[in-house]
Image (cartoon, grey):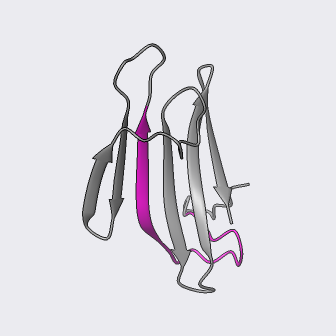
Amino acid sequence: MIKVNNEDELCCPSCGSNNIAHKNIDIFDRKEGRKHEFHVSVSEGVVKVDNDLSQNPSGNRGGIKIGFECEGCGEKSLLKITQHKGVTFIKFEK
């Protein structure tokens, strides 16, 4: 479950701190019936584009993964945004 405080700040799922920094972002562009699908990865100032959707958090559509590291406890977590049958889901994992 995603925990937010009164300002809608994302909080660490391990310790509850709001001092978390995103480290990497993966975007998976997938649409049913489309021939070309794309994966864009941004990490430490490097952008990569390929067609590898093997790590897509959404089985049938596009998906987004954002990796975070907590400045308080040092734990790493992953925010996933997925779609399924017109519904968008958001999940925060340790």
Q: Is residue 1 left or right of residue 25?
A: right
**Residue 8: which quarter of the image?**
bottom right
Total residue callouts: 0
Residue 55 vs 59, above or below: the answer is: below
Q: Which residues are magenta?
A: 10-29
Name the image quarter holding the N terminus: bottom right
Q: Is residue 93 left or right of residue 57?
A: right
Residue at 69% across / 68% down in the picture? 13
- Would you identify the image quadrant in which residue 58 lies? top right
Quadrant for the C terminus in the image: bottom right
Query: Is 59 located above or below residue 91 in the figure?
Result: above
User: Residue at (63%, 65%) from the top-left corner?
Assistant: 5
Rendered residue at 47%/39% (across/down): 53
Q: Position of residue 65 (x, y in %)?
A: 51, 51
Residue 78: x and y in percent read: 58, 60
Q: Does residue 15 belong to the magenta stretch? A: yes
- Residue 84 image position (x, y, % from top left): 63, 26
Q: Is residue 43 above or below residue 38?
A: below
Residue 62 place in picture, x, y as percent: 48, 33
In the rendered view, does 78 fall on the left or right side of 13?
left
Q: Using the image as rendered, state which of residue 94 and residue 39 is in the foreground.
A: 39
For the point 41% across and 56% down, the residue is 25
Magenta stretch: residue 27 in it?
Answer: yes
- Nearer-the-camera pick, 6 or 83: 83
